[in-house]
Image (cartoon, rainbow, N blue to C red):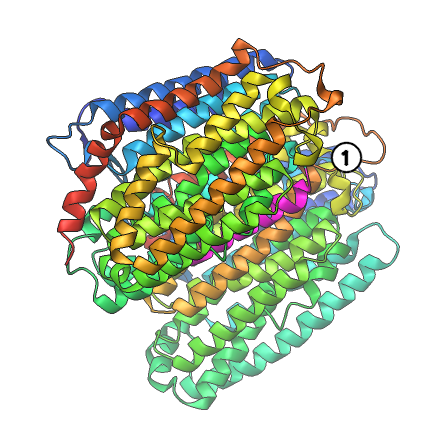
Amino acid sequence: MSMEFANFPYLSAILLSCVVGLLVILFIPAERKMLIKWVSLVSSGIAMVLSIYLFFAYDKAQGGLQFVEKVLWVESMGIYYFNAADGFNLPMLMLTGIVLFTGVLTMWDLEVRVKEFFAFTFLLVAGVFGVFMSMDLFFIFVWYDVSLFPMYPLIAIWGSTRKEYGAMKLTLYLLAGSALILPGILYLFVKSGLNTFDVVALMQPGVFTPFQQKFAFILLYLGFGILAGVWPFHTWSPVGHVAAPTAVSMIHAGVLMKLGAFGVLRVAIFLCPEGWQYWAQLMAVLATCGIVYGAFVGLAQTDLKYVIGYSSVSHMGIVGLGLATVTIDGLNGAVFQMFAHGVMTALLFSSVGYIYDKTHTKMIPELGGMSKIMPVASGYFILAALAGIGVPCLASFWAELLVFIAAFKTYPVRGALAICALVVGALFMLRVVQRTFYGEKNEKFEHLPDVTFGSGIPRMILVAVIVFFGLFPSVMLDVIQVASVPFINGLP
Amino acid sequence: MMNLWTLFVPELYCLLMAVVFFGLALSARPNPRRDYFVALFMAGVGVVVALACVRLEGTLFFEAYRVDLFSQVFKVMLAMGFFLVVCLCTELNGIEERHHPEFYLFLTTCTLAMMMLVSSVELLTIYVALELSSYSLYILVPLRRGHGVDVEAGIKYLMVGACASAVMLFGLSYVFGVTHTTYVVEIIQVLPGVIGTPAAIVGLLLVLCGFFFKLAVFPFHFWAPDVYQGAANQVTAYIATASKVAAVGIIIRMVALSGGNSKYLVDMLVTLSIASMTLGNLVAIVQKDMKRLLAYSSISHAGYVLIGILSMSAIGYASAIFYALAYLVMNLCCFLVVVKVAHDGSDLKIAQLAGLHRRSPLLAMALMLAVFGLAGIPPTIGFTGKFLVFAAAMEKGYITLVIIAMINATISLYYYILVVKAAYLMEPDEELPRLPVSIPTKVLTVALVTVMVVFGVFPHHLLEVARAAARMLM
């Protein structure tokens, strides 16, 4: 076996922290709930610290793939265990680490079937990390599926509101997506004639003919697009988000949907750049539809989680629009938006989760005046909502700005429509904030406690991240630039 | 001369086992514990014997019988399947105690027959081996202690089996007529040249029908649901695993006869494969009985295996062999749960799995992994099998077939999830006690789970063995 390790295998260590956490949890008796929670916290903490370390340790001057780990896995099929970090996946790894850690903290009070919950969560997150760091098509697909199927038990057991329906719909939709991805990947594998699944080898110019790229791209784009919530394949997403328990909503909307967009980028766009340029128009149309549709449907919702669910469809549309522009700014904005939206949605779901735990309702008309009852909890939600609207000094602002500048240049009409929809989106978010947190307070909930300092920690971390990258967007953009500039300039 | 007989050792060992059980069957007093331990010990040694003989090569009986890596790999799988089914027989409540020795006897003769089947390279020998295995099963199916359902299942199996045999004999006569020989080695030299003629293609297809019956490929699947449900759980486990593996082996050998350049044969196999997958998966959705569900799932899996076989390349055959092994392990794991949950030997409704996650977390986890494996979700061996099969088909450019198969896999996920849902989500109407799971059962469960995951993640060595076995055919 040929091995190639630059130095300490940081990326594998991130994966291992999840897998070992999972195995340790499996061997702890189910009654010892606190121990399970501490094990989860420690392993997720290690994963988060490592992912943040990698983000800052990446050598921007050198660029390219770093922290490479490559081991020949199945010789006859040309499958490599190949992990590497570049400007595109580092933000995603950091996002996953942060959301996982805060998600575990958010579920600290869980009492029902604790062992299974954290076991499934770590399996899911191992899959997510795997997709983000893999540079081998086989492993990307394996990790992708590994991250999907724990969603079913996670939602169906610990969820709420039509949980079994939501869980089944979500699982079937997402695996229907992989029914397109696998043929796409195998098609590229066979047509390349190189007998390898190595992304770096396959993305060399001239490996695929333009027709092959166009054909494979549409399969991969639709397949991954389902998970990215691309309109009109988004319908699983609000239903699933609403049904899922808080931490799962956070991980799901915060990280898992990015998996789809990242798959489009890493597999479809990397391997089929000509297909990308060919289908960019279609991508822009679908993305714009998603932005407009998500904003307007969100306007009519009365369930707080549905509101966030549809705003996610809208915001993921912005990612899609950024990718569709085929420009450096668009790509930068799209990746930045994936990160910013991930953190922001995690905060939204985390806040709603708290309110729901205490009041046992997430219907907007039944709430009202919450800022007088729980000023701190409300504060978190309002801040996240403002970030979603794109208020300056918060992370999403820069991401959305970049995407809209690029979109306006490339597709003036669609760009303008999307910006208008964003205004509608802002309107609906503010309306939700106004109805839920201001106005007459509901006497029923008056006695409820506010977020304590301890249980506020995960939310504070998320707020800090949003504000930090809002104030210093260049920290993020400098890393993404390292990957996007050479990639766009290298396009045929 | 001595040397030649060593080639035949796994089969001779099976014969010895059969004699032992025949002797036990003669004893006047039933003693299930004695029968079980004798069977367990002998089956365990059988696996060792089969493994020890895996490297042998040679021919026997005037070239009618070939021992090579291909046949030996299948013999190991059959011996393992037999051993694992015997492991499930601790509580053989589905069969009357005085019939236990007969039960083991016919399992043994069936295993013997299937070992001969995968080694036979002469048409009449193949036929004799196939009939021996079929007759053993014809007896095993109605052995169940029951109220007549078993008899119906037995008769159905016999009737469909007899029809399939008749069709196959007719096909054999065509093949003989076209090639003037019954030796596979000679057929493979003649048949590819004349495969374009109607007689040759019809003959080969009719021969395949006999084996499609064993594999429960559409339209020879009618027996499967009733027999699965009607036979005792352990017998069903055997039919669903070892018997399927042998069928895959012999179908690969027969299809390899065509030389790989017959468009008609490929079209026919593609049609049967799509029909099997789709029918199996769609009908499985509405099943309430666990064994019927597994029966329809086996019909759909027959379709997936055919995808590997119809690729007609060394990689395709290797992927089919890999898939057969994966299927053996995953299905045995499912049946382990069926046998343990329905320990009184009754049929198991899916709803009866309710609360399993509390009654036995280990069995629930094993069941979840096994059904997700059947659905083709990584990191299980089932996914790797599907991946290899699809890769082989893609190599030949059958992209539509692969997409249809993937859509089918998504459909199948629905009913597999219903099983997981029953085990993990639903609560039983009345509180049920914890399932007593003995230490050996725990070890067996953990072993099966480990095999499913480890070979799913590290398929390299297994794949190399399968490829080496498949090269024997080319």
What main secondary structure does the magenta stretch of the protein show?
A: helix
Of all residues shown, which one is farthest toward the right? B147
Q: Quadrant of residue B178?
A: bottom left
What segment carries the magenta color? A161-182
- Residue B403 against residue B43 in the figure, above or below: below
Give A251 or B53, whichever is nearer the viewer: A251
Residue farthest to the left, as pictured: A61
Q: Which residue is mark 1?
A: B427
Secondary structure beneath dot 1 equals: loop
Check the picture and name the quadrant holding the N terminus of chain A: top left
Q: Is residue A142 left or right of residue B218?
A: left
- Please give left or right for residue A50 compared with residue B128 in the image: left
Chain for mark 1? B
* Picture residue at 45% right of the left edge, 64% below the top: B403
Q: Nearer the viewer, residue A343 or A376?
A: A376
Amino acid at the residue labelled 1 = Glu
Q: How many residues crowd mark 1 within 10 Å: few (<14), some (14–19), many (20+)?
A: some
Question: Which of B220/A111 is in front?
Answer: A111
Total numbered labels: 1
The reply to whether the magenta stretch includes residue A180 is: yes
Quadrant containing the C terminus of chain A in the rendered view: bottom left
Reply yes or no: does residue B464 show up in magenta: no
Q: Is residue B316 visible?
A: yes
Is B444 located above or below residue A35 in the figure? below
Pick the front one: B197 or B379 = B379
The correct choice, above or below, for B205 with respect to B42 in the image is below
Location of residue B455 in the rendering, given as x and y in whole percent from the top left corner: 42, 40
Q: Residue at x 21, y 66 (%)?
A: A209
Position of residue A211 relative to residue A409, above or below, is: below
The picture places residue A145, in percent across and down from the top left corner, at 45, 44
